[in-house]
Amino acid sequence: MLSRVISGLVLAGGIIAILLFTPGWVLGAIVFAALFVAASEFEGMAHKDRGVTLHDKVVLRLAGVIAITWPILQDHVPAYGHGRALLLAFAVLGIGRIMKAAPIEDAMNRLAADAFAVFYMGVTFPYIFLLRQVNEPHGGYVVIMVMAVIFGGDTGAYFSGRFLGKHKLAPTISPKKTVEGVIGGLVAGVGVMFLARATFPGHASLTVLDCIVLGVGGAGFGVLGDLVESLMKRAYGVKDSGTLIPGHGGVLDRIDGLLFSGPLMLFYLEAVVQW
């Protein structure tokens, strides 16, 4: 428990410092590093009984990089958007599997697993870049706000579920999650949004409705992201996606909520708040 708390505080402090006091390319480099680690974790889960060759590693990482770099490349090549990036990434996966099809009876299982990994990371990771770019020059605080809603939701869900939880939410996937816990997490997410509006630079323009929608949506999609990752771990028979962060598991274990909440909250901020 102590290692979990210490590593969590160090990680949170490091992320805040990076978001507030470093140029954008530093966050970009960290996102790329997280992609490579996440790819390794996914391979460790999906192919733990099959083995992973150097060829497999190179192909998946190349496809992953292609899938998440469209926000950067689009500034220079406007026609290159999200859809084309995913198409090219899937083409790389297909070519890679054709080059190494044996054993043929397992080829489609491998390709399907890797395609899911690219889709999972390719439709979520880019929004970490994009969140940093909204509400400039306060983009760093926007990312912190999203992460705070997720963390607040997790904390609220933990205590609500521990003291009030009676009805299981998804026992096959995550036996400890309860409906009461989720409700407590949504309330906590809204509370975090009101706190962010009152304290974060550039956030005072958020309305009461904005705080409620972002708090409920962010915390709710954080639960969804956690359940999707739990589904993967249960299906593959592993407890954690990795062991990189003491007491917290792997990178995917820590960012599963962000990968789902980030895109939703960004959409609302751009479409409704018009940041």
Image (cartoon, rainbow, N blue to C red):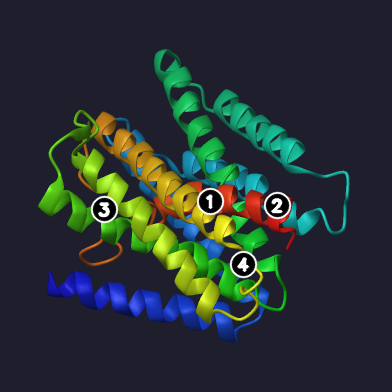
| Left/right of residue 68 with respect to residue 243 in the rendered view | right
Residues 246 and 59: in front is 246
Residues 163 and 231: in front is 163
Q: CA distance from mark 3 to mark 2?
A: 27 Å
Mark closest to the chain's N terminus, 3 or 1: 3
Q: Which residue is mark 3?
A: 157
Q: Which residue is mark 1?
A: 213
**Residue at position x 67%, y 59% in the image:** 130
Specify the farthest residue to the top: 105
> Is there a contact, CB below 8 Å, between mark 4 and mark 1?
no
**Residue at position x 44%, y 29% in the image:** 113
Q: Nearest to the eye among marks 2 and 4: give it.
A: 2
Q: Nearest to the eye among marks 3 and 4: give it.
A: 3
- Which type of secondary structure does the marked residue at label 3 adopt? helix
Q: CA distance from mark 3 to mark 1?
A: 18 Å
> Is there a contact, CB below 8 Å, between mark 3 and mark 2?
no
The answer to whether residue 250 is visible is no
Neighbourhood count class around disc 1 (C-alpha, 10 Å): few under 14, some 14–19, many 20 upward = some
> Is there a contact, CB below 8 Å, between mark 2 and mark 1?
yes
**Residue at position x 42%, y 21% in the image:** 109
Mark closest to the chain's N terminus, 2 or 4: 4
Image spot of residue 9 (x, y percent): 30, 78
